[in-house]
Image: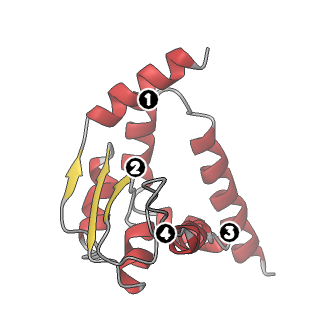
Amino acid sequence: MNQATETKTNYSFDAIKEAHTLSGDPEKLQEYYDQWAVAYDDDVSSEEYIGPKYIVDILGSLKGDNDLKAMDGSDKNIKILDAGCGKGLVGTVLKTKGYHYVDGCDLSEGMVEKARSRGAYNVLEIREVLIMFWKVESTLLK
């Protein structure tokens, strides 16, 4: 690995690690991800990020059970909300796999604008409700 690649990889890892330290503070998360939106794809790809594919594979493996009213992940017509969609990485994989009704929301305007350019969502919005959710969740977990 050359010096430039090694420096970029180190920076990418540091950016990802920093995002994880902001857990529980939605305002700081919103600000951080707005600023990170420009470099996010490069940073996660340099770390060989496979989270979106993994998540969609798990969804596809879910089998419905009428007695349990469980969701059937093989049904491409199920309605999906990608809450915290970021730049739309999961939505893009869902669209590629043939899911038709995928909506997304995120608290970062910068991330939502990048996600919008992917064309993977039927509805895509910036949602302050996520901030309220994180505040309630962090209070409950204390």
Q: Report which residue position mark 1 lands on.
A: 134
Q: Which residue is mark 4?
A: 41
Q: Residue at x 49, y 69 (%)?
A: 41
Disc 2 target residue? 84
Which residue is nearer to you in this view: 14 or 44? 44
Q: Residue at x 56, y 33 (%)?
A: 23
- Inspect the image, locate mark 1, and give the three-letter code of the amino acid beneath it: Trp
Question: What is the number of the mark on residue 97?
Answer: none
Q: What is the three-letter code of the residue carrying label 2?
A: Gly
Using the image, tell me which numbered label, if any, was put on residue 47.
Answer: 3
4 or 1: mark nearer the eye: 1
Inter-mark Cα distance, 1 to 3: 26 Å
* Displayed quadrant of residue 104: bottom left
Q: As drawn, is 126 to the left or to the right of 9?
A: left
Query: Of callouts 1 and 2, which one flags the residue occurring earlier in the amino acid sequence?
Result: 2
State the residue at coordinates (81%, 81%): 1
**Distance from Cα at disc 1 to Cα at disc 2:** 11 Å
